[in-house]
Amino acid sequence: MTIINLPGLKDQIEQISQSHNLPQSAVIEALREALLKGYERFRRSQKDNGDNFSEDYFENFDVILDIEEQGFRILSSKEIVETLDEIDEDHYISLEEVKEIEETVQLGDTVIVDVTPERKDFGRMAAIQTKQVLLQKLKDKQRQLIQEEFKDLEGTVLQARVLRFEGKSAILAVSSGYSQPEVEAELPQKEQLSNDNYHTHTSFRVYLKKVREGAHRGPQLLVSRADAGLVVYLFANEVPEIEDGIVRIVAVSREANPPSRYVGPRTKIAVDTLERDVDPVGSCIGARGSRIQAVVKELRGEKIDVIRWSPDPATYIANALSPAQVDEVILENPEERQSIVLVSRDQLSLAIGKEGQNVRLAARLTGWKVDIKDTAEHTPESEEFDEFDDEEDLSEEQLTMETPADWLAADNTLNS
């Protein structure tokens, strides 16, 4: 059987494997595919019009790499027919020709035929084509490996550092415990925090929002600093009671990039526990605020309100408007989830928040439409309901989670 020699094949495979962080099996597969493309280029060059070959013309061809002999062969599977009159020899072989080698074959059988050309015939252009295809195939293998390895990490938090900038996106190097020491991830502008300083080599934690599938060029990982899932993970990391399931995060509402530059980022998080002797809010804040300050530091000073969840909507709404003191919550229309909240005049601005941020986040957190009114001026008889309605954002902002596993899998419902 003919073989085209590739001197140093074994060493080259090992070197490519190390330089591209790919297993040798992936390198061998990429090389096989590239050599097959090179063979196609060789065959097309033999015809006056190489475009006569259909797209699937070479599907019955295969490349066999022989690592020990340091070379490769081209094999073709052909169907046995009576004669080859006006039938292409790439897919068919005559019965008479095959019987010279194997007498037991019959019409319709398939045989494997060595069609390896001479090395001198393979040609310089085919070799160039092979090299170009190999580089692309190696990139494809890397992309595929990243997609497979990081798919299970969607919705988790990874350590990252800034590599460079492409347009308004930051390209980060993300670390993992897999065979890829570092891979590139994209942090789009809308997923960035205004308080962050994105300088080269700056390190911080990011939320793996999505692993892009298919032949997408560029970074395969889409990460976020603005997703509410990052807040959940940071609290779970700092508060052992959350990790142990003693304290549960019921809902999160986050405004990482407020609509106005005069308003800073802010998050409200509702927590609860079934243990009588455990204070869920105090557990999240920690002694002298140590636990919540660790989260705030990672989020570059973002304001975070930890409030107690309650099954009673009125109590829950009042808690959600913290730090404002609420006089009364009237569930005006429970079916439509409309409420009126009465506060004293000196608490009005605090309850509403700068440019409505506090009441907006409270509405998202509770799932109720909230109308803030001055207790002294409230007259039920002449009441006109003019509630704060953030219903469009509610489906994405409101969460109800029962177990720590739910918190960690909440990547699609924690967007803010």
Image (cartoon, rainbow, N blue to C red):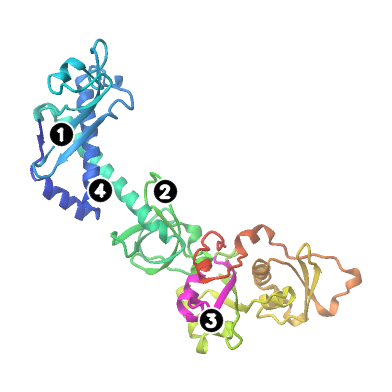
Answer with mark 2 or mark 4, whichever residue precedes in sequence: 4
Which picture quadrant has residue 49?
A: top left
**What residue appears at the point 82 percent right and 65 percent down from the top-left corner?**
385
Answer with mark 4 or mark 3, whichever residue precedes in sequence: 4
Residue linked to disc 4: 26
Answer with mark 4 or mark 1, whichever residue precedes in sequence: 4
Q: Amino acid at mark 4?
A: Ala
- Cα separation, mark 3 vs mark 1, equals 65 Å
**Which residue is situated farthest in the top direction here?**
85
In the rendered image, the quadrant that contains the N terminus is: top left
Q: Nearer the viewer, mark 4 or mark 3?
A: 4
Q: Nearer the viewer, residue 72 or 139?
A: 72
The picture places residue 268, in percent across and down from the top left corner, at 60, 73
Q: Amino acid at mark 3?
A: Cys
Q: Amino acid at mark 2?
A: Glu
- Cα separation, mark 1 vs mark 2, equals 33 Å
Q: Nearer the viewer, mark 2 or mark 4?
A: 4
The picture places residue 6, in percent across and down from the top left corner, at 10, 40
Residue linked to disc 1: 73
Residue linked to disc 2: 213
